[in-house]
Image (cartoon, rainbow, N blue to C red):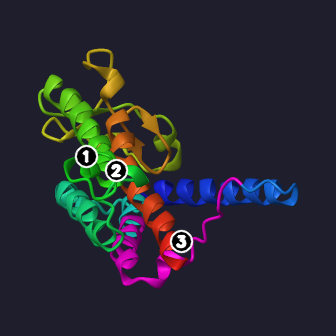
Amino acid sequence: MIETWLILFLIIFIRNKFIQKLEKENVYLWKQYNMKLVFKEIYIYLPLLFLILYLILEVLIFNNITWFLPYGAIIKQVTLLSYLGLIVRYELYNSMYEKYRDKGFIAFITSPFSLAIFCLCVGYFFNYIAIVSNNYHMPLFNDLSYWSGYTDIHSFTVDSFYILGDYKSKYIIFCDIIDLGYTTLSIGDVFIRFYPFVILFFSIKKSNEMKK
């Protein structure tokens, strides 16, 4: 999940720099976002705690300590739940569009929370296709991870949830094919990561709006 936070902060940084450039030319279209404001609330620190936990677990994997892998699914679910504090604090269940705010169901379906849940459901659906089609295993297509030492080819067994992918694997497009060297993602995992991305982005946006 670390890449999700880093990409978000990078996008906001570039956005702020672009707005600064426009303001120097007396063009005022958008407001800059102060990322520090969201860290003044306690609700950001539970997701941050799980982010640190993920980093620790990644380091353990690099050192061939993998006893926690069977609990990976539980850790992932709890991590996603840790963002609920931000959702409630910044009312991300309300519409992201001013004209639909407090309009009941319309407000909800046009909210950042609904967008995040949609991305989450799409991600799980794509992963489900890959897992069910491959006898309830997730095929891995590694390359960079072998070089980095993150993946050990001898660690895979017939009973493992993760198995080595090959030409016999089905729906390869939905399998774990995005090798980052420290983890391998599927397209479904990318969509799942949009969940914290959306929640964090709109939390930062709302924290700036509330300061006015």
Where's the C terminus, which quadrant? bottom right
Give above or below for 114 relative to 63: above
Which of the two discs, 3 and 2, labels the residue nearer the N terminus?
Answer: 2
Q: Residue 106 versus residue 132: which sits nearer the camera?
A: 106
Residue kind at label 3, given as amino acid type: Asn
Q: Residue 201 versus residue 95: which sits nearer the camera?
A: 95
Q: Which residues are magenta?
A: 29-55
Q: Which mark is residue 208?
A: 3
Residue kind at label 2, given as amino acid type: Tyr
Question: Farthest residue in the top direction?
Answer: 167
User: In terms of image quadrants, where is residue 156?
Assistant: top left
Please report the residue visible at 58 percent of the width from the left and 61 percent of the height from the top.
9
Is 26 magenta? The answer is no
Residue kind at label 1, given as amino acid type: Ile
Q: Secondary structure at mark 3?
A: helix
Verify CB contact (< 8 Å) between mark 1 and mark 2: yes
Instruction: State the CA–CA distance, disc 3 to disc 2.
Output: 20 Å
Q: Residue 74 versus residue 106: which sits nearer the camera?
A: 106
Please report the residue visible at 25 percent of the width from the left and 46 percent of the height from the top.
106
Q: Which residue is mark 2?
A: 100
Instruction: State the CA–CA distance, disc 3 to disc 1.
Output: 24 Å
